[in-house]
Image (spheres, rainbow, N blue to C red):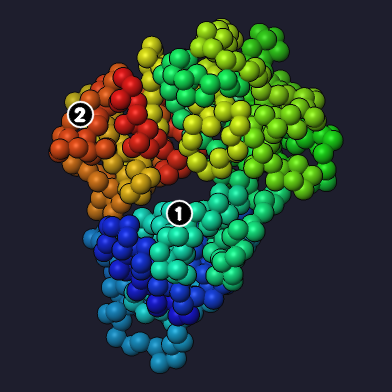
Amino acid sequence: MLFEDVAKAFDEIEGKSGRLEMTDLLARIFEKASPEEAERIAYITQGELRPPYDGIDLGLGEKFAIEAIRKASGYPKSTVEKEFEKEGDLGVVAEKLFSEKKQQSLFRKSLSVLSVYNSMFKISRATGSGSQTMKINRLVELYNNATPLEARYVTRFVLGQLRLGVGDPTILDALSVSHTGDKSLREEIERAYNLCSDIGYVARLFIEDPKKMKEFKIEVFKPIMPALAERLPTPKEIIAKLGKCAVEYKYDGFRIAIHKKGNRVEIYSRRLEKMTHMFPDVVEGVQKLKPKEVIFEGEALAFNEDEKRFYSFQETMHRRRKYGLKEASGKYPLHVFAFDLHYLEGEDCTQLPYLDRRKKLESFLPTGVIKLSRMRIVSTPKELDSLFQNALTMRLEGIMAKDLKAKYTAGKRKFAWIKLKKSYGKEMDTIDAVIVGYYRGKGSRAKFGFGGILVAVYNDETSRFETIAKVGSGFTEEEMEKFQKMLDEDKVKRPPSNLDYAMEPDFWVHPKYVVEVAYDNITRSPTHTCGKEEGKGLALRFPRMVRIRDDKGPFNSTTTKEVEEIFRFS
Ligand code: ATP
């Protein structure tokens, strides 16, 4: 398949904001693709080359792309830079300069999807001395054979700025539509995807043979999408929903999935990034576990031996950064509180009821630094509340109530797990929102050049971001400087194509950073678009910045549905 077909589809996708149209455009591409091509197209559409846990970064800075455009177009560097200044998008600059290029090469070879992917893969792999020159030369080679439109997308891709606004759900829908003309296979495809978190792998298997979705099995070292919890405001409502249920302590640590096969151990974050190197102490503990092949998950947090108390996620990370991994491992040893089991000695445990998974987990834990989350079965609101109060006295965040019969709901937010946190109805509550824009500083803040952020939540039904607050307080002076620098690097000329907004910030940024924002309550307001009804969206009152959530990507932010639920309960 020609890369030009993909570039044309991307161009059309950019012009559309509706999910249905995007799905159809992508489906038409998948219809024509071989399994290998489908795999590459799925990754490229996501702006990736491999799944997140392979940690592949193209690592090409704007400086290098400018150099490659200069070499391939024959224009002087000053022209390329001037155009960049004007357009704010090197993809558009490449497209423009290559279409103006007088002498198109006579020996231009059409680019195929596979050859473009291979070149980009090689660019990402090049390391060591001379690697930057090699990266530039490969890019020049691509440009020499690219049409102007192809050059736009190659450039954006290598810079990590593809930003088509196509989420995983649209790709999953498109695969189904490519085969049946409708979304009837979406659920099967999504199941496979949630079990391996690898969109390219799923696309390849599906195009090879759609039956492979039903037969799809969990594999060690392919992390599963984490199950997510719903929330309810009181013990009474939780018991009304679940009846007799399990209650576990809710640890405010770092969520990790642990994979072990023989002596090899890998640890993945909530965002499915490989974090093994961060947890040498945990790896050592896991190697000693009895099972040969196992996947389980838990929360990791540091314990202070002197004060006999747990550190929060922030404190744990701070200590690990400050003292270095080795010293921190000795001084502030990590404990992992295992709370679920995905796979054991060849058996997919995600299909078992919660209580069976828990029993199997208990068959080889606790041992060493790997503990078990504390769990008790309760039947009344009173019992549930007393465990909740216990958790609070131990300075934990709250509890997780779990449906005894529920399967593991990979990648889904279901009432199989319900969280009850100390903030509900009492102190402050928070949501996790995505930064989509920022403001210039005024008055005393003018010296920082930073005046706050515009944040949005994710509507997972429409695959669009919707604004919910302008956050101007809660930043320290240091943070203001940090945000200013971080966001300056990411600003874009136009509002993100997958954002619904009513107010405009001074600068737009591509949805990427997630922040935790505290607020007093939620009201209806015409200035925001979250869950908009009759011209008014939901908005946070008195929003305050709490912290950056490095462990979350934009699609893991709080959803519109959750905000609507919080609004209903309050
Ligand atoms: P979410 O994970 O629901 O998107 P979040 O990361 O902000 O949101 P919370 O809403 O506070 O976290 O609660 C869910 C998280 O609680 C889980 O993702 C997990 O990391 C953590 N957790 C702590 N203890 C447990 C437990 N015993 N069982 C399940 N999850 C737990």
- Determine which quarter of the picture holds residue 215: bottom right
Label total for image:
2
Residue at the image point whose x is 66% and y is 39% from the top = 352
Which residue is at a point 80% across and 30% down the rendered structure image?
364
**Residue 503 shows in this picture:** no
Crowding at mark 1 (Cα within 10 Å: few <14, some 14-19, many 20+): some
- Looking at the picture, how far across and down is residue 471, in whole percent? 28, 29
Q: Which residue is mark 1?
A: 168
Q: How far across and how far down the image is residue 198, in percent?
A: 57, 55
User: Residue 300, relative to residue 73: is it above or below?
Assistant: above
Question: Taking the image as drawn, is residue 562 in sight?
Answer: yes
Look at mark 2 in the image and give the residue it sits on. 524
Place of residue 141 in the rendered image (x, y in percent of width and height, measured from the top left): 48, 78
Give the side of residue 68 with respect to residue 313, left or right.
left
Residue 454, numbered label: none
Q: Is residue 243 above or below residue 272?
A: above
Residue at the spot 22% in from the left edge and 38% down from the top edge: 532
Going by the numbered disc 2, the residue's amino acid type is Arg
Q: Quadrant of residue 542?
A: top left
Label 2 packing within 10 angstroms: few (<14), some (14-19), many (20+): many
Query: 424 above or below 556?
Result: above
Callout 1: CB less than 8 Å from ligand 1: no
Please identify the quadrant where the C terminus is shown: top left
Q: Amino acid at mark 1?
A: Asp
Q: Nearer the viewer, residue 29 or 497?
A: 29
Q: Horizontal and vertical percent for residue 20?
A: 32, 60
Front in this rendered view, residue 263 or 216 = 216
